[in-house]
Amino acid sequence: MYSKEKPKTGLARCLEIASARKPLVVLSGVFSAISGIASFVPYLSIYGVIREIVKIYPELESIDKAEVSKYAVYALLGILINILTYFLSIVMSHLAAFGTIYDLRTAFAKHLSKIPLGFHITLGSGKLRKIMEDNIDSIEGFIAHQFPDFVASVTAPVCMVIILLAVDWRFGLVALLGIILAFVAEFIGYGSKSMKENLGKYQDALENMNNASVEFVRCMPVIKVFGRERSSFSRLKAAIGEYTEWVLKFSLGWQNCMPAFTTIINNIYLLLVPAGLIFYSFSSDERSFLMNYLFYLIFVPAIAGVMNKIMYISESFMEINEGVARMDEVLNIEAMPDTEQKGLDGALDLEFDNVSFKYDGAVNKALDSVSFKVDPGSYVAIVGRSGSGKSTIASLISRFWDVTEGSVKIGGKDIREIGLAELSSKVSFVYQEVFLFKMSIADNISLGHPGATREDIVKAAKAARCHEFIEQLPQGYDTVVGENGIHLSGGERQRISIARAILSDAPIIILDEATAYSDPENEYLIKQSFAALTDKKTVVMIAHRLGSVTDADEILVMDSGRLVERGTHDDLLRSDGRYKEMWSSYTNAMNWKIGGTNV
């Protein structure tokens, strides 16, 4: 399911992402380079002033004021150019970043809509949220801030080395020795294999914690009902503990190299002091020596600023490499193949032709050589223990995934040859767990039929037995779900989802038994709405309670990914097979007693 082509990483990938705004990126780099060069002009100007002072010392009253003033102007111009060009660089990089992040988020969202729907379940909403927000935001931050700093961190050291060696190569080599030692300390921290592994583990732990947090919050009503706050918190607590472990390992990885780097880079002058004493003993021109020595003592603090920026950029590179890799992990998921072909008309049968399916990374097949046919207008139920493959069948009909072997056909046509838009218009899925968008009730109902009139929406709502409670809402059908404290019960949400399916008027209905967790009143209303939903439609129900499928035209019994039995309820009971065993367990559970009293 993944493309073979490996994407670029780090800076190269960021520049590739921002290629649509290349002129802005290039201008940002040019201005940043000029800013980095201009930052050294004040130091050179100071060197010029020192030279003028040393030249006439101790007769300071004879100093050439015009020459000193000229250096002062140079210093001021250097500062102004540094500030102005850095400002322009940041403006250009931000313009490029804002446009790029808009394009990237849009492209990422479009890609998510094209990949197999099953991946949304596999990846988890916490991971996708982190990539969509944190990782993509880090790319925006890198282009807007770190890229100009990166250009400056490349330009400034080159200029710095040239200046260090040009004034006095001996002092220049001593300063470079300090820089090399600082680089070694930095590499030990940033470049080590263990630090890279720790960063990866830290990112994994962060994603797991996000997923666990989202799941814990979403399941809070169920957790509260069953009083399982303490035990249900264990997974989230474990995820937080794992995150804490790896963030500490990652952070403590700097405990030696960071102080070493900071100490060396901020105290290079300590190397210059003994070197100055040694060089002075061999100097024949005291004035020239003193002039150069003073310059290096003044210039050395600039080295710390340049090197600190390089260290900051190095850390950013580690983070952006990891962030881009995780984003590309999703972008490299191949889009579900689509076609513009149409032609599904009339009564449509549904057929599984020797279908096998295995999830990515799984050892065993979820479905193994499953074949059956559902005639138009018939009602088929799929039953089986947890993990038997019944939900996988429903997912394959809706093309959440593509089959590994065999084919799923509608109207005699392989669904891979049917356009996804047309397939969604022919197959409607009603889940147990209903998601309503934060928009009006009318918009939620017409989600699958955007052109529906208000009359069509009301008609569907009446058929789904939800018109009455909608009318009692503050703004009726225009009431926004979740706004101003407007929240619907599970049964009400379920009936709105059924109204949505009724309005879409798909000829094939997949039901993930929607009444499994409903109270008696809502179950009665939902079953009434099913009558309108399934009228003259082909219905496939994923059954969790056997009592709800006894009137099915055919029952398919799944076990370990295989279709082991099929027939009507009465036929399967007479066959004395797996279904009868399940039915006995079901009826025994229904007749369960406490202290001799029927529940």
Image (cartoon, rainbow, N blue to C red):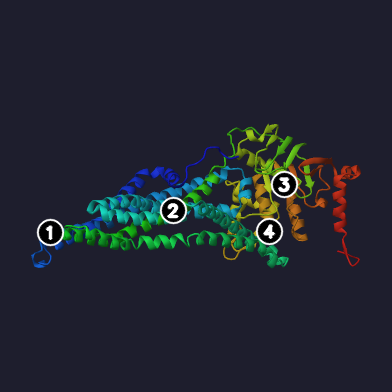
Please give the count of numbered marks on the rendered protein.
4
What amino acid is found at the position of numbered circle 3 in the picture?
Answer: Ser
Left or right, 134 with respect to 217, comes to left
Is label 2 in contact with label 3 (beta carbons under 8 Å)?
no
User: What residue did someone put label 1 on?
Assistant: 67
Question: Gap in Å between the C-alphas at discs 2 and 4?
Answer: 60 Å
Residue 476: x, y in percent? 61, 60
What amino acid is found at the position of numbered circle 1 in the picture?
Answer: Glu
Is label 3 in contact with label 4 (beta carbons under 8 Å)?
no
User: What residue did someone put label 3 on?
Assistant: 391
Closer to viewer: mark 1 or mark 4: 1
Residue 275: x, y in percent? 28, 60
Q: Quadrant of the C terminus?
A: bottom right
Question: Gap in Å between the C-alphas at discs 3 and 4?
Answer: 24 Å
Question: Gap in Å between the C-alphas at discs 3 and 1?
Answer: 85 Å
**Quarter of the figure with residue 329:** top right
Closer to viewer: mark 3 or mark 1: 1
User: What residue did someone put label 4 on?
Assistant: 492
Question: Gap in Å between the C-alphas at discs 1 and 4?
Answer: 86 Å
Using the image as rendered, state which of residue 156 and residue 161 is in the foreground: 161
Is label 1 in contact with label 2 (beta carbons under 8 Å)?
no
* Residue pictured at 40% horizontal, 43% vertical: 20
Left or right, 430 with respect to 5, comes to right
Closer to viewer: mark 2 or mark 3: 2
Q: Earlier in the sequence, mark 2 or mark 3?
A: 2
The secondary element bearing badge 3 is classed as: helix
Residue 356: x, y in percent? 72, 37
Q: Which mark is residue 79?
A: none
Left or right, 371 with respect to 120, comes to right
Q: Earlier in the sequence, mark 3 or mark 4?
A: 3
Is label 1 in contact with label 4 (beta carbons under 8 Å)?
no
